Image (cartoon, helix red, strand yellow):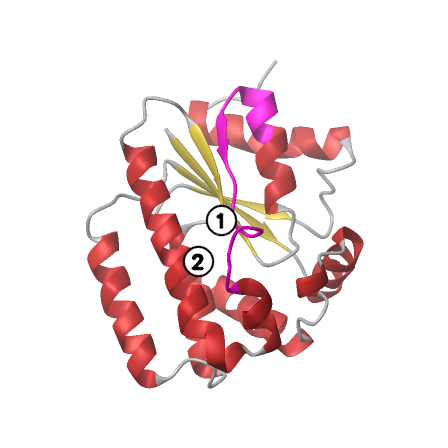
Amino acid sequence: MHIAIAGNIGSGKTTLTRMLAHRYGWTPRYEPVDNNPYLADFYADMERWAFNTQIYFLNKRFREVVEISRSDETIIQDRTIFEDARIFAPNLHDQGKLSDRDFDNYTDLFDLMISLVKLPDLMIYIRSSIPTLVEQIQKRGRDFEQSIRIDYLEGLSRRYEEWIATYEGPLIIVDGDNIKFGNNEADFRKVTDMIDAKLYGLFPI
């Protein structure tokens, strides 16, 4: 089974992935952020490094999807291939950071890849406002994220809402502003109750 977590930068995807993996005994697959050799350069000069960064993520994410499809384990994935293609690449293109030529090339490659895989068995989307995202980005203190612009986050948020409104697979939406699953046991239980209801058709006793 394939469980996926989606959400903007700083929404708490990694935290929720770790907690759910522990709670259910699922195998976690984390987003390859720290190993991306382009990311620091990208945040310093998006127009120069946007295509390289997106291709790196697309390659890693597609490899993960293929591996997940071949696994007998239940795997929970931190960020999805759909977000790369439906959120980050179009946002960069809209902002003029990704040329028409590069965007068309990237989109053609994604369309081919996605024709070979199926939707996750459950998508969990963490919906968070910009102030919440900024607070959590500052709190975790990754140096390369401190230069992220507010308008960049806002563009991503708009794209997320457009994408999730048309998403056709099994879906749960978590209110990241009000459900503080990372440090509140009762709030985490709210998330697991939604998951149990969606996957198993019942709430735990």
Residue 78 spot, x, y in % from top left: 51, 43
Q: Which residue is mark 2?
A: 83
Q: Is residue 25 magenta?
A: yes
Q: Is residue 105 above or below residue 66?
A: below
Q: Is residue 32 magenta?
A: yes
Are the residues tagged 2 and 1 within 8 Å (C-beta)? yes
Can residue 168 be seen by looking at this rendering? Answer: no
Q: Amino acid at mark 1?
A: Arg
Please give left or right for residue 58 compared with residue 130 in the image: left
Q: Quadrant of the C terminus?
A: top right
Residue 113 spot, x, y in % from top left: 24, 54
Please give left or right for residue 24 compared with residue 136 in the image: left
Residues shaded magenta: 20-38
Residue that extends furthest to the front in the rendered view of this protein: 37
Q: Quadrant of the N terminus?
A: top left
Crowd band around label 1 with a 10 angstrom C-alpha radius: few (<14), some (14–19), many (20+): many
Q: Which residue is mark 1?
A: 79
- SS category of the residue bearing label 2: helix
Q: Amino acid at mark 2?
A: Glu
Q: Is residue 132 above or below residue 195?
A: below
Which residue shows up at 20% across the image and 59% down it?
112
Q: Which mark is residue 163?
A: none
